[in-house]
Image (cartoon, rainbow, N blue to C red):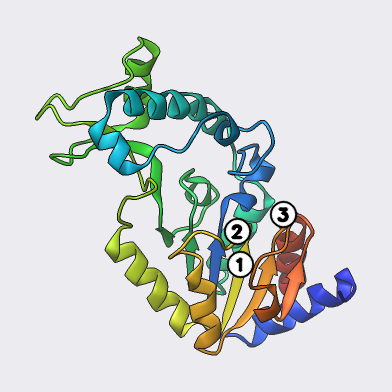
Amino acid sequence: MASYDLRIDTSVQLLRKAIKIVAFTGAGISTESGISDFRSPGGVWERYRIVTYQEFLSSSEARAEYWKMKKELFYEMRGAQPNKAHRALAELEAMGKLDCLVTQNIDGLHQDGGSKRVIELHGTNRHAVCVRCGKIWPIAEIQELLETGNYDPRCDACGGYIKPATVSFGQTMPEQALAEAYECATRADLLFMIGSSLQVEPAASIPREAKRAGADLVFINRTETPYDHLASVVFRENAGQVLEAIVNRIKS
């Protein structure tokens, strides 16, 4: 692997010549904000099993298990603040350098950090929704119900099950968001992939689609991915450090 400074220089050169730039982010960009990813030792995800969407719909026990995990995750996300990486991407957008930002994350930190055009492939944990009629609540209101021990909250309009506005395993991804993400990827000439293991499909295919359409790829991830060989530049350093350095170099 080339030196850090050379990789920064190469990334800046790619960014300066690119016309359409896309960022694709995963859970790794938010670990610097204190939010654990799926694989963090001792994190929320390690202490609870995955409850599929089908289980959620068919079993009150599964819904209770799911909501207990979400109750704990609420506290972790509530105090999280955007980090250097989130703010650097927002700054690139404000500079007219970033065309769109596609994220697998549900934490809303990109918006908190100042990004305007954010495509959320897996929904958001900021709201809850009735799976029957579509009524929406702020997640904090549902958290109040959980605090009383109600781990199977129901819609006050139709009696349907309430669920965070996130995409669960086995649940269909939002078609419009996915279509917009692919459109962004296929017209990009540079894509920054930040903090994703690229193991969850179909989201993980977005960088591959960008590459197939002719884009250069810059990967910023602490661990290897199955597609590192496609990238022009690979960073193992922290996303905040790398993106801040790139933005500072562009500004200077």
Q: Distance between the Cα atoms at labels 1 and 2? A: 7 Å
Return the disc, 3 or 2, that comes first in the chain's sequence. 2
Q: Distance between the Cα atoms at labels 3 and 2? A: 14 Å
Task: Point out the image quarter for the N terminus.
Answer: bottom right
The residue where tag 1 is placed is 193
- The percent position of residue 159, horizontal first and vertical second, equals 12, 26
* Residue shown at 39% from the left, 26% from the top: 67
Amino acid, disc 3: Gly
* Residue shown at 56% from the left, 83% from the top: 211
At label 3, counting other C-alpha atoms closer than 10 Å, the crowd grade (few under 14, some 14-19, many 20 or more) is many
**Which secondary structure, mark 3?**
helix
The residue where tag 3 is placed is 240
Q: Out of 205 and 193, give the one closest to the viewer.
A: 205
Residue 176 in which image quadrant: bottom left
Mark 1 or 2, which is nearer the eye? 2
Res 67 label: none
Query: As drawn, is 109 to the left or to the right of 53?
Result: right
Amino acid, disc 2: Ser
Q: Out of 191 and 201, give the one closest to the viewer.
A: 201
User: Considering only vertical position in the picture, is 224 above or below 43?
Assistant: below
Res 196 label: 2
User: Considering only vertical position in the picture, is 210 above or below 159?
Assistant: below
